[in-house]
Image: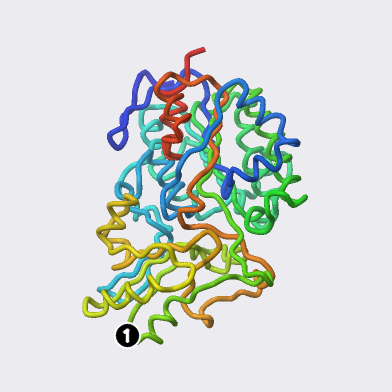
Amino acid sequence: MTGAVRVTVNGRSYEVPRQPVVGVCIDGCDPAYLEAAAGVMPELARLASDGARGTARTVVPSFTNPNNASIATGAPPAVHGIPGNYYYDRDSGEEVMMNDPRWLRCPTVLAGFAGAGVEVAVVTAKDKLLAFLSEGLPGRCFRLSVEKAGDDGAGLVGRPAPGIYDPEASVYCLEAGACLLERGGPLVTYLSTTDYVQHRFAPEEPEAIAFHARLDAVLGRLHRAGAVVAVTADHGMNAKTRRDGSPKVEYLESLLKEEGVAGAQVILPITDPYVVHHGALGSYATVYVEPEGLERAARVLGEVPGVEAVHPREEAAGLYELPPDRIGDLVVLADRGTVLGRTPEWHDLSHVSEGLRSHGGLHEAAVPFVVNRPLRGETAEALERGELRNYDLFDVLCNGVRGP
């Protein structure tokens, strides 16, 4: 056990907890899912009754990697350097995938605690997140991805891990955390699920409600284990379809070419190893274009149906706290019902041809925030006013709850 009282990471000071704390990120959990499933989530209601419940804001783009990196570091992308899964390297002429932790520009809160001698655990559903979230953790800390759980997962949870496109992958992630706590496990734990269900099913559909009932049972276990538990999400989710159910896509690269903007490069930062459920289509895109074509590109994109904002690089970096060197010359945001693509040939829509749910824009930037302990004055007021960010998660867990 550490003798440290506080740990400072990225300019924020965190009190070393006296009892276990668990941060839970339910991937893709739009508030509408919890509202629709309220009748089958008594444990979540109990958490909120014992503590507090409200809505927080995410990082924009409202994608998985930027938001999990923000939660883990307690900071926006301008600090940690991860604005999506890809950016375009002009010097090499290549699209660069930023799934490697070497792209992080600052330490995580988890590593800060571990460095002070605190026992830390990280469990993710997606393997792509584990390297980010466990960066800087010494070997004694527990880390597990459901996707590659193997014998470690089976030994902990008591059964083999499900596949990454199985709804049970998220349940298994939370179960692993509950098992650790029930065995007298770590003082600080972070659990991050996957959003396969939310991409596939609307909040009111039976499959979504059944899934949230399964999550609820494990949230109850975390609560009963005596931990301080805070639940939030990395982004929300919305239907992105036309009246016939087909995806409502605007192909930006094709449109720019048709309008004579030569050489424009569109990057879709949602693109990752798990494109089956979203087809690499989200409501946020960046565009790289030569200086002489910048004004025309901005005008063309601003007239596209479904596009609600086109920001020059510096403006976007200021508005959304993004690293300017890792976003395009233009940042494009779509409306609630539209996704942005490159060209029709670039995307495989076979798995989303009859319905697409996705995220990335401003309309997926409101997420739940639930904590199972009463909050201190300023934190309670911030939650009530909707001013908390999802990346305040560990600040709330360590500094924002009232003592026992």
In the image, farthest residue toward the left: 292
Residue under label 1, please give it. Answer: 262
Picture residue at 50% right of the left edge, 45% below the top: 366
Camera-nearest residue between 244 and 390: 244
337 is higher (above) or lower (below) than 398: below
Picture residue at 52% right of the left edge, 12% below the top: 404
Among the 4 quarters of the image, the one containing residue 102? bottom left
Task: Point out residue 344 in the picture as x, y percentages from the top left corner.
Answer: 53, 81
How is colour applied across the structure in the image? rainbow
Camera-nearest residue between 315 and 376: 315
Dot 1, how many residues are within 10 Å of its Cα: few (below 14), some (14-19), or many (20+)?
some
Among the 4 quarters of the image, the one containing residue 136? top left
Q: Quadrant of the N terminus?
A: top left
212 is higher (above) or lower (below) than 52: below
Task: Point out residue 312 in the picture as x, y percentages from the top left corner.
Answer: 28, 64
Tag 1: amino acid? Ala
Task: Point out residue 195 in the picture as x, y percentages from the top left corner.
Answer: 60, 52
Camera-nearest residue between 347 and 171: 347
Indicate the secondary structure of the residue bearing disc 1.
loop
Q: Is 296 on the left-hand or right-hand side of 371?
A: left
Picture residue at 55% right of the left edge, 44% below the top: 192
Q: How many marks?
A: 1
Task: Point out residue 166 in the picture as x, y percentages from the top left corner.
Answer: 70, 55
393 is higher (above) or lower (below) than 104: above
